[in-house]
Amino acid sequence: MSFVIRQISKRATGGEIVRQREVAGEVLTIGRGADCDVRLQDLAVSLRHAEVRLEAEGRLHVRATGDQPFGVNGRFDKEARLKAADGSRLTFGDHRVVLSLEGGTIVLTVTRTDPLSVVDPGGSGDAEALAPGRRWLGKRNLAWTGLVAIGLLCLLVPVLAMNGGLDRWLSPRIDPDAQWSSGPLSMSHAFLEDDCQSCHQEAFVSVRDTACLTCHSDKQSAAMVVRTNAEVRAAGATEAPGRVADHAGLRRLEWGAPPPSDLGGRIFALARQTFNRPEQRCAACHIEHVANPLTEARAEVPTLQTAHTCVACHADLDRRLTDTDLINTPDWPGHPELRPTITTWPGPGPARVQRVSMARRPHEATGLVFPHALHMSRTNGVARMAQTLTRYGAPLDCASCHVPKPGDDNYRPVEMETACGACHSLAIAGRSGTRQIPHGESPAVVAFLTSAYSRGEPVTGAANLGPRRRPGERTGAALSAAPTVGQRVQQTFSRGGACFDCHTTSGTQIAPVHIVDAYLTRGAFNHRVLQHRQDAAGRPNCTTCHAAETSSRSSDLLLPRLSVCADCHGAETSARVPASSVASADCATCHSYHAPSRPAPRDETHRVLASLPPRSGAPAP
Amino acid sequence: MSVSAPRTGGRSDARAHVGFLRHAGYRWAWVALVLSLVAVAGYFLADVKPRPNGGTWYGYTLGTVGALLILWLTLLGVRKRAITPGSWSLKAWVSAHVYLGIALTVIATLHTGLQFGWNVHTLAYGLMMLVVLSGLYGVVTYATLPRRLSSNRRESTQKQMVEAIAALDRQLNDAAQGLDETRAAAVRMSIERSRIGGSFLRRLSARPMDCGTRRARLKLRRLRSGAGEAQQAALDDVGALLDRKSAALVQLRRHLQTRTLLGVWLGVHVPASIALLMALTAHIVSVFIYW
């Protein structure tokens, strides 16, 4: 018997070389050794790996010689009995031996299945074979991942959340648009941190005043104020929002502001217009998101950044706002004279008040008779009388009548009963004790007196027998005839009567009295400032500004002129003005933007008394 | 070394190679320096209220310049793929890319006003810095690694190195035919398990511990004693071949290592650039949405 061994090897160029030889005998050896019948140059094959023995006709017995098995049709085995005609496949290392029967001869076809080396000499010249592209961490994958992730998380999700599109899926504690905030809000607005839309109400539109006025409008009704306060407190605010009026209407502000003068200003104006960020907005001056989020604490209030100085608009305001009643104020020396609101006609009929410049030396017509000089004299009868009264014990001074209003910059209105009553007594001795004539409307006084006189009051003293007799005055003929009740009432209203001291009367009618609540309605004077109250030696200095001691007429307007203010404010140090009295002269001392009649809030260093103290030595009223 | 090559009417720098860093006498370095200095001077001169940051007029100006720079810098990816007619120089473009990219860090940092936080704006800034820093690493590798690449290569190409190893494998296979099973298995380990290239981390190592050839040499050194005379001769041949193969492997692996290092920064630079484009979009769009 014999076997045919057909060895097929591949050329480098791709073709095949077939070598065939015949081996006689019953047994065939397979291995790497040079003495084997089928020599496989394969290091995975043993030197003597297996032998093939021919048993019956066409039947073969394959057996491993050593410990190493061989492959039989895909399985590993150390022994196998096979039919040559079945075309079985034996594998030894990388070599394959296929059995077949061709014309009665057993043929073993030997081929190598794998290339020898792990390196493929054909393709290794190119970098990709040895440096495969990273499948998951490749540049393209990473780039797309980053692009899509950032696009989703930082843009799409916040935009959807902003429009409420994710309300059903997102917990209310997650704020996708919080990542858009460039810095923290101030403490006063911190409770709005999670609610961007409370201010940024419309996409691509800068924050408008409507958002601010939701809480800060001064036009809210009392009920609205209560409701708004409750709402912001429920949202976490620590204090109630301040209510502010605007400086002027939006159109007036726009017209009143000066046009940009230089190129830079024109560029800014163009940019503001192009990007829809008008200058006349709350948010243009009150700026949020300013603090550095990592290193700085929240500011207390939004950072203030003024767009214009006061003078920028007011220097030549009437050129742009031709209907304005405001007088141009180019600077402090050019500030118009004080224009107090004074009563020019107290009545009868409607009272007339008007603003009159102090430059016109105006006189007031309050309907009241009160010569300051008479009351402030240190030597006359008034002074003597005050000295005898325990309440005063000294000649009258300003504080005798003018009492500070607690917690306010100013004084209480002078009230007749408390301020004048000690001397100008309204008391009459009734049958059941002292009674006060009601100070007020004429009819009530007439009714009271008629009733009292009818009952024979006053029982003693008082000015019941006609005009009061003054020291040194002879008693008049009026005493000779007993007057009627009507005459006696009439006498109270006439010269010498109690009313006539201070009022202008006609019959039993008292002429109307009208005194304005405040003289300076467009600016403020703070009596609590220490220098406004006392001089360097600590003495009261009311008369520095108010020429009360020399005012002998009731119609004198005891307000200073602006030049008196300018003595200290904006003054140079001179012999007349000691250095300690030199004070600032900026607009904010007397005016503020949102409330021009009040000064702008001051910092702590500005010396203002907590409250106007009563004059030392003067007993409390 | 001369800074610029004489112009001969043909391609510029044709006679002596001038790298992108020194291109045109550092022209773009000067442009970038002046740009940065102007930005810094403006930062200190501009009286911005209430504080310097991206929301002031100077901040918006720097932001616009920075955004346009980023767009232009990213366009290098388009430009290098476009074979354009005309005389624009890709080298000039790369030179400007590098130096203006460095200037961008100055402009963008001034744009932030050093106001950082956990927000989309700082994300964009961080990505930009990552892109620039990875780019700087790229510049350093391009300045140093090519020299190492050619000194390691010694006149041969990667293909030749691979072929040399394949030839050594064939010789090893032939020389080991006479060896017994255990020793033959050691040689097989060298032939079959000497991995070259592969994943990123594998390519970074020139002498990996699990290299088949390294293990084969160790094993055969142990199995040297007790071999028969015929085997001894084969072992000598195999040993010499393994030594040569080991040296060839180190050379090829070092070649791949260097090439990997030359390319790795792009794996950060490019994805971060693309992510930056989106972060920049989110940054700008969000600012205008909450205007």
Image (cartoon, coloured by chain):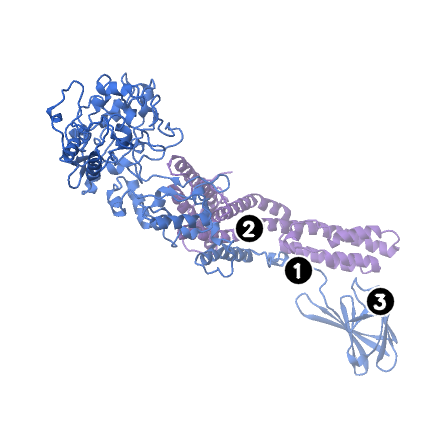
Chain colours: A blue, B purple
Q: CA distance from mark 3 to mark 1?
A: 30 Å
Residue A51 image point, x, y percent: 86, 71
Q: Tell me the element at label 1.
A: loop
Q: A204 or A126: nearer the eye?
A: A204
Closer to viewer: mark 3 or mark 2: 2
Q: Is residue B230 left or right of residue A268?
A: right
Which residue is labeled 2 in the image? Answer: B268
Q: Is residue A288 left or right of residue A432?
A: right
Which residue is labeled 3 in the image? Answer: A49
Q: CA distance from mark 2 to mark 1?
A: 32 Å
**Residue A327 image-quadrant placement:** top left
- Subunit of mark 3? A
Lower position in the chain sequence, tag 3 or tag 1: 3
Q: Is residue A327 left or right of residue A283?
A: left
Closer to viewer: mark 2 or mark 1: 2
Q: A591 or A404: nearer the eye?
A: A404
- Subunit of mark 1? A
Which residue is labeled 1 in the image? Answer: A121
Kind of residue indicated by mark 3 = His
Closer to viewer: mark 3 or mark 1: 3
Q: Is residue B211 visible?
A: yes
Position of residue A404 relative to residue B281, above or below, is above
The residue that appears at 49% across and 54% down in the rendered structure is A176
